[in-house]
Amino acid sequence: MMFVLGRNFAAKAASKRSWSSAFSTMAPYLLSPSQLRESLSSGEVSVLDASWFMPNSPRKPYEEFKKKRIPGAQFLDLDAVASPHELGLKHMMPSESLFAEACERFGVQPNSHVVIYDTHGVFSSPRALFMFRAFGHVRSSVLDGGLPRWEAEGFETEDVPPADCGKKSTYPPPILDKTIVRWTTIAYEQIVANSMLDITSDPDAELVVDARARGRFLGIDPEPRPGLSSGHIPHSFSLPFTAFLETHTTPNSSTQYTTFRPIPELRQVLVDAIGAEHAEQVIGGNRSITTSCGSGMTAGVLWLALRMLGVPNVALYDESWTGYASRPESRIDKSA
């Protein structure tokens, strides 16, 4: 395929497989609150709050974390555990060493079961899961429904000042799996080259699905980032991340939260977005697919839904629309 990897990738991939098999056992992608509560007694679970809000939101995730969280949880700031970017983009994938340093601060061991949640239900936690899985930490899961569902099902929270985890670890630097991460300037060039291919006739054309709201995809609604044009990458598909989710209202409360839809519904959503033929190719591993969004955050929701469907060749465009549209030479499509 057109996405060319470095010469040493085969050796690094072998090293990564060895690292992963030595320290990690595959965990389910999703956990329910009751499953998490049962797992906490094992002592090998690290719970991380990876809440994140859009740049135009007044909410402050760390301030909310300090006031209410799952007992023992620590805060994963996705904007802080990130690599710098030439365009000033936030929450880009961290380097291997930066990821390892963060795990050490959290007391995460290579064999720890990392469970990640957010305060929406499902929003930013899949992006954090993507990061762990991309670094080979496959013993990692998302709390489906997040903190609101945890509370709705009657489990306790804590509001005392968060303390240091008190169990620093040694985390060997992992190897980033570049088959599932599209990042750096090279990735932009690859995305541009792919956008010029005819997806209906060229078997090498990779499908790109966009998690933003359809109005932004069509260029009708503005982007939340001032000065950034809306629209979409040519030949990409609109697949709002909310289509993979269902909304729940907690009993005796107006609080709402989201969870993933059942697998058959996820499959139908994919078919509705990209067509039955493309969906069959993607699920069968005969065509690769890359997820994108505004800044690489909710693309994680699409990535996780596709992985739950068994899609083997799914990547995430780390820069996403902000990186693409920030470059003046980018072709921006606003057609349906």
Image (tube, rainbow, N blue to C red):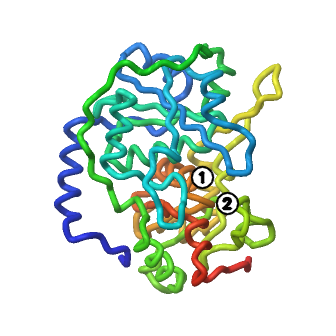
Q: Quadrant of the N terminus?
A: bottom left
Q: Is residue 140 positioned above or below 164 on the image?
A: below
- Taking the spot 68% from the left edge, 49% from the top edge, the residue there is 54
- Side (left or right) of 173 relative to 335: left
Tell which of 146 and 89 is nearer to you: 89
- The percent position of residue 11, horizontal first and vertical second, equals 16, 60
For the question of whether residue 159 can be seen, the reply is: yes
Type of amino acid at the residue the image marks with label 1: Thr
Q: Nearer the viewer, residue 299 or 306?
A: 299
Q: Residues within 10 Å of mark 2 (few under 14, many from 20)?
A: many
Q: Quadrant for the C terminus, please.
A: bottom right
Question: Are the residues tagged 2 and 1 within 8 Å (C-beta)?
Answer: yes
Residue 243 in the image: state x and y as whole percent.
68, 52
Q: Quadrant of residue 26?
A: top left
Location of residue 113 by image quarter: top left
147 in relation to 81, above or below: above
Give how far apart the Cα atoms at labels 2 and 1 are.
8 Å
**Residue pictured at 70% horizontal, 42% vertical:** 246
Which residue is label 1 attached to?
298
Measuring from the top left, give residue 308's x and y in whole percent.
Answer: 49, 47
Q: Quick one: label 2 or label 1, which is nearer the N terminus?
A: 2
Whether residue 260 is visible = no
State the residue position of label 2: 212
Residue type at the position of mark 2: Arg
Q: Position of residue 284 (x, y in %)?
A: 43, 63
Q: Secondary structure at mark 2?
A: loop
